[in-house]
Image (tube, rainbow, N blue to C red):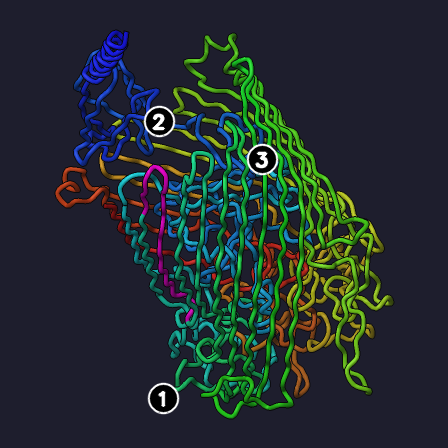
Amino acid sequence: MMTRKVLNIRALLLALFISVSIGVFAQTSVKGVVLEPSGEPAIGATIMEKGTSVGTATDFDGNFSIKVASPNAVLVVSYVGMETQEVKLAGRTDLTITLKESGVSLDEVVVVGYGTMKKSDLAGASVSMSEDDLKGSIITNLDQSLQGRATGVQAMSTSGAPGSSSSIRVRGQSTINANAEPLYVIDGVIVQGGGNSGSDFGLGDALGNGKVSTVSPLSTINPADIVSMEILKDASATAIYGAQGSNGVVLITTKRGKAGEAKFTYDGMVAINHQNKRLDMMNLREYAEYYNDMAANGYISSPSDWYRDPSVLGVGTNWQDAIFRTALQNQHQVSAQGGTEKVQYYVSGSYMNQEGTLIGSDFSRFSVRANLDAQLKSWLKLGLSATYTDTDESLKLADGEQGIINYSLTTLPDIPIYDIDGNFSSIVREGYTNPNPIALAMLDDIKLHRKKLTGNIFFDVTPIKNLVWHAEFGYDVSASKADRYKPMVDLGSWVRSSNESSIQKNSSWFWQLKNYVSYNGTAWDKFHYTAMVGQECWESSYDYTSIFASGLPSDEVHNPALGNKNSYNISAGFGSSAMASFFTRETLNWDDRYLLTYTYRYDGSSNFGPENRWAGFHSVAAAWRFSNEKFFEPVRNVIDNGKLRLGWGQTGNANIGGYAWGVAMSRMPSALGAGYRPANIANPAIKWETQEQWNAGIDLNMLNNRLNLVVDAYIKTSKDMLMSMQLPSYMGTQGNGSSALAAPKGNFGEIQNKGIEIEVTGRPFVGEFEWESSFQISFNRNKLKALSGTENAQLVGYGQWSDVVSVSEIGQPLYNFYGYVVEGVYRDYDDIMNSPTPDHFPSDGVFNKSNTVWVGDLKYKDVNGDGKIDANDRTVIGSPMPKFTFGWTNTFRYKNIDLSIFLNGSYGNDVMNYLGINLTGMKSTWTNQLNSVGDRAQLVPIDPNKVYPAGQNWYDDITNIRVKNWQTKTPAARLNDPNDNDRISDRYIEDGSYLRIKNITLGYTFKKSLLKRLHLENLRVYCNIQNLHTFTKYKGYDPEVGASTQDSSGLVYGLDYGRYPSPTTYSFGLNISF
């Protein structure tokens, strides 16, 4: 019996051995080569046997070898930037596989809030930007990459200073006083900071009252670390972020490691930056003619002999050439990525240094990043991300009346930069107040040093199939130090008898904790669903200290602690805010035809009082992929994919600062010592600003994905708008920004934005020669729908001299320019008498050229028809809002050569050339002017033979003066401008439309055969030109003028105070991988 059992066991083992042997020997060896469309070997392409984990990768020659279980197996071939192909062996053992360029992939996975989705399953409106979209451009800050490349996104550079930010608006201006910038989320962590000025970082006076330079939180991020950006635009997409998503959401994903051998990459670039444009200012000869004209009209009693004969003079000093320089820039990055099937890593380090084209300004950044992913167990995944950034900036007060640019334009051309001893020249003239612009730029020192550490740690737990619990902790810690020093100066008209020094330190901490559980499943083979529910909380806090002192013992000593103790000004502050949230999202997909997404978020914010702290936000979106219907099969060879989308949603806005509902106390001196008073009027009833948005869209992919169209239409309404209430002065407040008693913040308005967005992408040519083209155009109409509260019929924006420059009225777009309409100039005395009475008409009827209206002054339109010119004749004179913005990218490839050309622009917007008030005012002999004032009204006597008593002349007799060139709209030069010819009028409104050659990149990628001998995986060289030329009618430096850096009310847009212009950049770059 035992013998039989033993024999049976032996027979069983023998049968098992034979079957295993047959399985082993039945494997088929397959070899081959994988080629790119150009015929070059595809290095590192992945070849997998379908349905198994068996796979390999190609070598430097594109060759591969793999053993498969069956001669009829199917190989899946994938390669970056190429379509994934399935190759049926059908008994073949030697293959040549040529890849195809990938078009728009419907199976592409894109990042959405708290997860990812297939692009084909999206029902909301969003825009994706890949790593390839960022290549080639010289991008210092990530927000610059959004200009013209994303529909519905208007990115306006607020300054051309190195490290500066852009003003980003997604689908128009949705709020006024509250922060209107989108939410930035990097690898799931909210990026703190933002806004347009140094004051937003708590630097205040240490940065020149927050008006020195725009500083961007995104300037601390290395663009080369980015793999994709997703811009969520409509409420159905952003509602998952609730109160933080009302201005749009920008999701940024950084590079992570991949399994395989370590891959090392170096990216390097050197560049020069140059200011191509100069304003046409008067040179010395032309200024002398202007000076003599003022003298000939009796405004200079004792004319200088220096200017008597302009023909003998040279051109003088060109102050624009003096303040602008050709600046150098360099950027270097090294990175490594790789890992095993269970652990992958990505690490990088970068350094960037950029000199500003305005002398004395520069920016440098050092950053390191580390990303780690580890599959600790089959059910447990760990992820880590960390970034440290260190930036240094030398800042200059560029724009504004006291900015270097304004001084360089108004300083006279007969003044040298240096005296004969090589020192800054002194300017000693009666009535002359300008400092030497170069001395101002080089002597005053403002530096900003920032450190930032951001990152997160997360766990993905999969207790059962398709169920994932994601737990994450994120942080953002930053510190900044601003140093400002102003030395003693004695340069003639510019005297500073005491030096000044200030230091301000700022720290901020942000942490967030989130947990969410997601489940995806399938039923009846056609019904796919996902459900996600989660919780999130975060806290943000800051503190700052500052010290100011003057009277330091020496200009070699910059420590304010050593200043005059009576000059000390020490301040400190701190604050915090917090939010707790609960959210859910469900998606339903029936047969890849009918899609439905629902989201809900419930937020609680410490920025509101206990009664209004919590609010809920819903959204729903549906889509129909009509191309998957049976009736569509006859045209499927033309239209590959067609999808209709419709969405509705709500979001909120709580961006008004901490404890805005309560009363802050302000310190004040008194006879009995320090005292305290309320700094603002409380409003415990303040609540969430809410936004409701409808979106309808269509997606079409045609001709085998060679032609693609995306169209979206939306209506976005912001209600209960957060803003400061405007109150009458007898209540102790003067409205927005009052220094006496700040008005209460509340919910006082409604704004609506309507728009259409169109994106067309195509590949007219494929193969050895390729042409890819992408065109985006966005139309948006903005309207103030309602205001509430006392005297809130309109919102007023002020210029630098407290003059009204813009008005936002019910039923009109925001920020309309407001002022007088110029009809011409007064030709003669009769013209003055027969026109509506000007506001500087003499009450006694006696005209005087020193203090009343005069021949050659501007004649303004009597808008209200009451027969007189006064403030009631001011009206809307322009709008800074464009009718549409656009971008057009064309990329050409021929074998190893690639050429990319990117154009962007804006149409229909106006710019107020506020700088022109100084440059065309002609009210002083000591201020240089634009050459265009040569068209000014020329006064001549009607009767040149008329005889006058001693001490009088024809130019004092208004009845004997006429304007020779009476068709002009430029007034005559008049000392002190008694008629206020420089008041805000349409004279300063210019067409701000432009077309810009934004970026041209020419590159060459070396052949793989050469790279193999060099033991390299990739080698590419390129040259790039950025901001090559701008076609525009605008006469200033740059028509791209967004939110004002000189105004904190949020009510001024499109004013050019002498904005630091964006430079033209010429660069050469190198990319190496091995």
Q: Residues within 10 Å of mark 3 (few under 14, many from 20)?
A: some
- Camera-side residue of 245 and 924: 245
Would residue 419 appear left or right of 792 to someone viewing this image? left
- Camera-side residue of 512 and 283: 512
Which residue has dot 2 on it? 764
Percent x, y of residue 91: 20, 11
Reply above or below: 728 against 713. below
x 55%, y 37%: residue: 469
Assess whether mark 2 and mark 1 are in contact (beta carbons under 8 angstroms). Answer: no
Q: How crowded is mark 2: few (under 14 residues within 10 Å), some or many (20 or more)?
A: few
The N terminus: image quadrant: top left
The C terminus: image quadrant: top left
x 54%, y 49%: residue: 473
Amino acid at dot 2 = Pro
Secondary structure at badge 3 equals: strand
Distance, label 1 to label 2, CA atoms, is 65 Å
Secondary structure at badge 2 equals: strand
Say which of marks 3 and 1 sits in front. Answer: 3
Q: What stretch is highlighted in magenta?
A: 337-359
Sequence-earlier tag: 1 or 2: 1
Residue 938 in sight here: no
Reply above or below: 1061 against 1000. below
x 42%, y 84%: residue: 424
Q: Which residue lies furthest to the front in this view?
A: 1
In the image, which disc is placed on residue 420?
1
Q: Decide whether the magenta segment is chiefly helix, strand or loop.
A: strand
In the image, which disc is placed on residue 517?
3
Sequence-earlier tag: 3 or 1: 1
Reply above or below: 683 against 766. below
Sequence-earlier tag: 3 or 2: 3
Amino acid at dot 1 = Ile
